[in-house]
Amino acid sequence: MLVNYSSKELDLLARIMRAEALAEGNLGMLMVGNVVVNRVIANCLTFKNIRSVNDAIYQANQFSGINSSLFQSTSTTKEKDLAKRVLRGEYFYPATDALWFYAPRSGESCKDLWYGQRNAGRYKNHCFYKPDPGVCKELY
């Protein structure tokens, strides 16, 4: 287990994974889960006071999915199983060291830099970004 979590936080993680990446399928949801867990692990940048799954998901202005009806409904067993995989330490490229992701407009490429952070790669409609090596030691 990478981070400690409660049953409530397992449900929260499963729900944000669904709300942010349902259209990207299981792998896309797992990658969103990687970003959430990375934010809990990282002790850098704007994530210095993030110490739980709950903190990461509800950090101000971070996950627009919390306002989605997909987030408001209870998670399924399958979604919780996906969340457990991430919490146990399974990583999926390009989200391995990523702390951010966004969905560009249809037909747009991922930017090389997004708010000063390097592009780690793309999966379907999500571009993932990671800090430079040495900035967030906990991730490398």
Image (cartoon, rainbow, N blue to C red):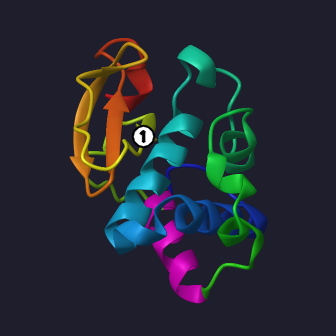
- Give percent across and percent down for residue 129: 34, 31
Q: Quadrant of residue 89?
A: bottom left
User: Which residue is label 1 attached to?
Assistant: 101
75, above or below 101, in the image:
below
52, above or below 60, in the image:
below
Residue at x 53% of width, y 62% of height? 17
Residue at x 27% of width, y 58% of height? 124
- Give percent across and percent down for residue 81: 51, 79
Question: Is 137 positioned to the left or the right of 92 in the image?
Answer: right
Question: Could one spot residue 4 in this view of the protein?
Answer: no
- Nearest the eye: 122 or 59: 122
Magenta span main SS: helix
Q: Residue furthest bottom?
A: 77
Magenta residue check for 18: no
Magenta residue check for 82: yes
- Give percent across and percent down for residue 14: 59, 68
- Boundaries of the magenta span: 77-87
